[in-house]
Amino acid sequence: MIHALAVSLGSAVVVAAVLSLATIGFTLRYAVSGVFDLTYGALMGLAMLIAYICASAGINLWAAMILAGGCIAVASVLLERLIVRPMLSRGATSWVMMIITFALGLAIEASVLATWGPQFTSYALVGRTYHFGSVVITTDQLWIVLIAAIGTLSIGLLLEFTQWGRAMRGTAANPGLAESCGIRVTTVRTLTWLLSGLLCGVGGVLIAIQIGSFMYTSWEQFFPLVIAAAIVGGVGRAGGAFAGALLIGLVTALASALLSSAYEDVIALGVLILVLFIRPRGLFVRAV
Amino acid sequence: MNDTQNIEIGIGNPEKRRGRVLRLAAAASALSIGLAACASGHTSSSGQGVATVAVLSSFTGADTGYGQEGMSGCIPAVDLINAAGGVLHHKLSCQAYDDRSDPADAVPEVHKILASTPSLLMTLGSGGNTAAAVVPLFNAAKVTVFSETGQSLFNVNHYSYYWRDVPVDASQGYAMAIATRMLGYSHPAAVFGQNVSSQGSLPSFVQGMNLLGHPVATKVLLPTSAPSYATQVAAIQSAHADAVVGEIDPASAATFTTELKQVFGHLPPLVGDQATDESPFLKAVGGAVGASTLRQRLTLVLPVASSTGPGFLAFKKALLSSATPNKTTYVTDSYSAADYDAIITTALAADEAKSLASANFERYIMPIANGVPGATVVHTYAEGVAALAKGEKIHYEGASGPISFDRYHNWEPGYVLSQLTPGGVKDLRLVPNSILRKLEVGQHATVG
């Protein structure tokens, strides 16, 4: 039993680390612009491929990951400037924006599949393994946990202690009031899409590293987990996103260890419903 | 006034409105099936034109890659048939339809195929996740459908137009149990994916191990595409399993085997089935744990098929000279070979019936595949057409070797243990049929 619990905890930490950056990016994007962006998953998948292409060209994988994150950041800004902002200025509701981003996500997916095809690829990482009691972890997973921890902490510090962070929080809380206080809301939104795009790209590559082999459509399996973690943690909260990812990872791992892996998804979704039933805005939500 | 009335009617009678919508949807479905049946039934046997082979399979989704396997069987078959003059002067073409491994996506594709393909010769490719939804529709439209599901659901069926040229899951599970014992493993972990197409062999594998006197160490169902399988791997380790036997979808298998290797320090022995021999699986898992490691540790339990016979060599030559993408990958792919055979068999049946309509040629498929006394054995479409022209009965033995359908149009093959090699697969030992038949009727047996 203790062995199973330890393994579950170790697995949950790795899963939380893998999901956390993508979840934080997603939740920041929603908090500051009010757009539940359903292109996000397709962009994660694109980042996996960009990193693969860069790594295949001989670039170090971790540098390739940053490059992929940069590409997705630029793509996100273009998305915000060319589609999201004009649509919002025309009075598009959040539902309309969801539909538009959903359609755009499908278009991105279809375009990538048409050019790249549905083929499995792998970063082919060979790392050492380390034993921490019952938990076995690889060098790459240690890097993933480290990157996620640094990323989460940095975003948390940025939001709490920098002018930009305060501007983001102000914009998220009340854009009209923020603007009247001299905050350039449109610039804040653009910079937020840039940052969340970077997190989306890096998060996508971390997922691809963890799962071993991937194809472009692999994002489809993990995007629901990203959304679930964001909702459980409270959409708009960076720390909440990490806690949500940890909770999702822990619950699924424990369900598998203590009951049966057949009920893993059932338990995870059950917890999601229970959390929303008790706290409809998420576990860790408060005014940003 | 009228607008207001319309709104009130809409709001006040939701049941009526829903009923109307459902009736309209049902009528539209019936109309599309009916039109397709008419189109299929009225396909002319004279004149020139193009007839279609619809490959309704998974080009995306959990079973991604099945679609390309189907196309890799279809393209060389169609090339050979067209080179021999076509079927009743009709050139064939392969048309791909993506079911996304999901019945909700597959059913609209069926309606699309039926409504928009006037000269539909046959369809192939529906796998375990979608077959239960699509086979009844094709059958109702009187369209020949070769399915690639091993599900027991079809072991006894009433679908005249349904055929299965892949092994039945239950039989495959017993064969895997025997193979596990033949390899000397006595305490295996049964690890199967949680999707419909993966776990069909699980019950018979577990029962087979019981009947052989060596119950499985643990039974693990893997949720599809989870970010980690650490707890499942820990359970296998705790159970002291000496091998991992099962069927898992490629994406999940890549993550699972990576963590298996990570925890055990090496990849434990794996025993897989026909799905494990597929290109997407080999690419995904080979990429994750290393292709050479996978070749060393994985033993396959496959239907007996000749990889040197004239039928296989014709398939190989046609595939390698075709425009199929990544064609070398599919030379030893048993699903591609089965799809190739399905098309050649159906085309020969159409030739013999002198009709492109399934309703007319369906009854010729069984004798061509199983053979009848005095039939001429043919290995290619051209040989078959030549023999038919002489008025001979034919028995087609193609890329998969001899196939024998039962009265429900299912195939019960023998099995062989095989190992992956850089160039394909190498057969090791035959699974004894005598033991297989004992397990199938619930008798205890011993593997010597």
Image: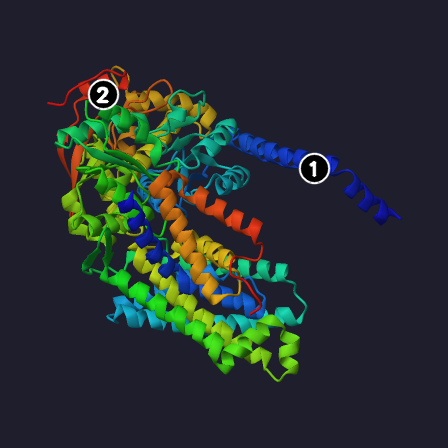
Answer above or below: position of B368 versus A56: above
Question: Which residue is painted at 28% across and 46% down in the image?
Answer: A2
In which quadrant is the C terminus of chain B drawn? top left
Q: Picture coordinates of residue B84 (x, y %)? A: 32, 38
Q: Picture coordinates of residue A144 (x, y %)? A: 31, 64
Dot 1 and dot 2 within a common chain: yes
Left or right: A236 in relation to B326: right
Question: Which residue is painted at 31% across and 70% down in the image?
Answer: A64
Answer above or below: position of A238 versus B260: below
Disc 2: CA contacts within 10 A as few (<14), some (14-19) or many (>=20): many
Q: Which residue in the structure is indicated by mark 2?
A: B211
Answer above or below: position of A59 versus B227: below
Q: Is residue B253 visible?
A: no
Q: Which residue in the structure is indicated by mark 1?
A: B18
Colouring scheme, one of rainbow, by chain, secondary structure, one colour:
rainbow
Mark 1–mark 2 Cα distance, whole angstroms, equals 53 Å
Answer above or below: position of B190 versus A269: above
Left or right: B109 in relation to A217: right
Q: Earlier in the sequence, mark 1 or mark 2?
A: 1
Q: Picture coordinates of residue B133 (x, y %)? A: 48, 33
Q: Secondary structure at mark 2?
A: helix
Left or right: A173 in relation to B166: right
Tag 2 subunit:
B
Question: Which residue is painted at 51% across and 41% down in the image?
Answer: B104
In front here: B259 or B375? Answer: B259
- Which residue type carries mark 1? Arg
Q: Which mark is residue B54?
A: none
Tag 1 subunit:
B
Question: Which residue is painted at 30% across and 54% down in the image?
Answer: A10
